[in-house]
Image (cartoon, coloured by chain):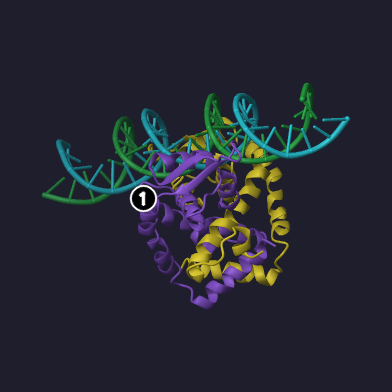
Chain colours: A purple, B yellow, C green, D cyan
Amino acid sequence: MLLEKEIQQKNFKSPQQKLAINLLYTTNWLNYQYHQHFKNHKITVQQFNVLRILRGQYPDYCSLKVIKERMLDRMSDASRIVDKLVEKKYIIRHQCPSDRRSVNLMISDKGLAILKDLDVIDESTKDMFKNLNTKDVDKLNQLLDALRG
Amino acid sequence: MLLEKEIQQKNFKSPQQKLAINLLYTTNWLNYQYHQHFKNHKITVQQFNVLRILRGQYPDYCSLKVIKERMLDRMSDASRIVDKLVEKKYIIRHQCPSDRRSVNLMISDKGLAILKDLDVIDESTKDMFKNLNTKDVDKLNQLLDALRG
DNA sequence: TAACATTAGATGTTATAACATATATTTGTG
DNA sequence: CACAAATATATGTTATAACATCTAATGTTA
């Protein structure tokens, strides 16, 4: 649906201005879908992300620093997100012996189990994007990758 | 730049999964650019948005309800965002005489003035998207509009 | 090796987001 | 016209985001 219609704005100053608003608007919608999916499991999108990063490293340890580097929102407060996940026993945390400033993090069995449940979100994305065929999806990915330079 | 490289994830389950992550990641970056731009002016992205909606109606009044409908993030707390803007004297608010539940909102001269300063963000978008030519930007807009059905 | 700089992470604070609920007013129905 | 339903907005609460600051450990260098 035309963005102009959805936010009832007649026209934009430039295609670039429209693109910025289009991205913000579309991704807000996407974020909302994610949020709805996760809230039943009492987990946030950010926490989900951290768990996925840790699963990617499993069974190796991962430091907080590495998590920060790979998070989608790099400004975020990784330290306290990890706190929550440790509280919920989805993550095991202990001090790194070779560098005592650093922490060793590993996803627990319980963490792996909940991720398995949450992974159905990836099936849902196919439904969320049902208005686009795979060729269009690939094109979008390509353009977004190009956008970031 | 390839998303795979940026978040150091080797591959995705489907083009759709990649698209979801690509949108979240790219828009986080965009949001950050906006955020940086506005923070010098002590105004948030959401507040900026509300001001723009009100300018779109100027010199007519606009109710809170209409603002909610047009906001990019429709879940947001329009009431308190407006509060802040009234505090800062960017908005004039008074009760609607014909329906005393409703409020009449209008952007003030001070609000119009700050918007004029903030509008340079629209020039910046051209720079933010400098890696894409206008044809690509149009294509992205078209695909995003199609995505939302 | 002492002194300073850098790094990894934790913590404190304030503002905003998310969600539920409350209040006042208007609208619709028997 | 009384009364329930719907509407427009405000408010309360808890969690998270954003930013700055702090602490402990390690690296660097004169």
User: Which residue type does callout 1 highlight?
Assistant: Lys
Where residue A126 sits in the image (x, y, percent)?
A: 43, 69
Where residue D21 sits in the image (x, y, percent)?
A: 64, 26
Question: What residue is drawn where x is 58% and y is 53%?
Answer: A70
- Residue D29 or residue A20, whichever sits in front: D29
Residue B10 found in image quarter: bottom right
Residue A92 found in image quarter: top left
How many numbered marks have been drawn onto this rendered protein structure? 1
- Residue A99 or residue C10, whichever sits in front: A99
For disc 1, the marked residue is A110
Question: What residue is drawn where x is 68% and y is 48%?
Answer: B119
- Residue A62 or residue B78, whichever sits in front: A62
Where residue D8 sits in the image (x, y, percent)?
A: 39, 43
Q: Horizontally, is B95 left or right of A74 in the view?
A: left
- Residue B22 or residue B66, whichever sits in front: B22
Q: Is residue C28 above or below residue B38?
A: below
Q: Is residue C4 above or below residue B71?
A: above
Binning the other alpha carbons within 10 Å of mark 1 as few (below 14), some (14 to 19) or many (20 upward) gives few
Where residue A108 sits in the image (x, y, percent)?
A: 41, 49
Q: Is residue B117 something one can see in this rendering?
A: yes
